[in-house]
Amino acid sequence: MASADSRNDQTQDGRANVFDVLIRRNGWFLLTFYSCWSALSGLLSYARIATADNPPLAWPDIVIIVIVAAAVTVGVAFPLAFGIVEGIPMVLAKLYKDSVREEARKERDQAWEAWLERREAAERDGRPFTEPPPSRNGNHRDNGN
């Protein structure tokens, strides 16, 4: 079995495969996983005990129900916690990146509109217009980003 150091050397950002959590988020993942797992196990155990055929149940029966509920809910709690800890930051980063891009597009469009207005005003007045477009003066990009 590979050590954590050798696994981390294999990748640039601390990931080894799709189900690994970023090292800096391990604490959040464990907190989320155990919270989800406890809640789901408790709910499933309570539902099973509350709907028992002949209440009250004996302690051995309750313990078995809780153990089975804990085993069953691991398969739900793990992907749920992974989705929360890795998915939410990913979606928020995408939304932030899109808003930054939209602001850059607006800024670029305003620069082009202002340049076009100056060019049209120079043509109306019969003045020569030698100002380079915004894509050539180095202040704004014109690559659609």
Image (tube, helix red, strand yellow):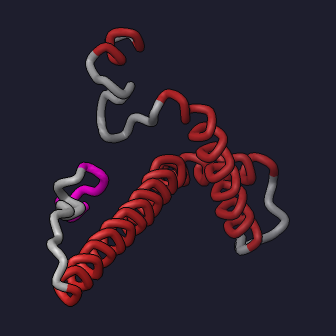
Would residue 55 appear left or right of 72 to someone viewing this image? right
Spot occupied by residue 116 in the image (x, y as percentages of width and height): 24, 78
The rendered magenta stretch, by its main secondary structure, is classed as: loop
Taking depth in this image into account, of 114 and 73 the one nearest to the observer is 114
Residue 142 counted in the magenta span: yes
Going 35% across and 29% down the picture, which residue do you hit?
15
Query: Which of the 4 quarters of the picture holds residue 113?
Result: bottom left
55 vs 126: above or below: above
Spot occupied by residue 44 in the image (x, y as percentages of width and height): 65, 63
26 vs 58: above or below: above
71 vs 113: above or below: above
Residue 71 visible, this orientation: yes
Taking depth in this image into account, of 78 and 133 the one nearest to the observer is 133
Spot occupied by residue 91 in the image (x, y as percentages of width and height): 44, 59
Would residue 11 appear left or right of 133 to someone viewing this image? right
Taking depth in this image into account, of 113 and 66 the one nearest to the observer is 113
Going 74% across and 64% down the picture, which residue do you hit?
46
Specify start and end residues of the magenta stretch as a single range: 138-145
Residue 1 visible, this orientation: no
Q: If the image is split into quadrants, where does the N terminus sit?
A: top left
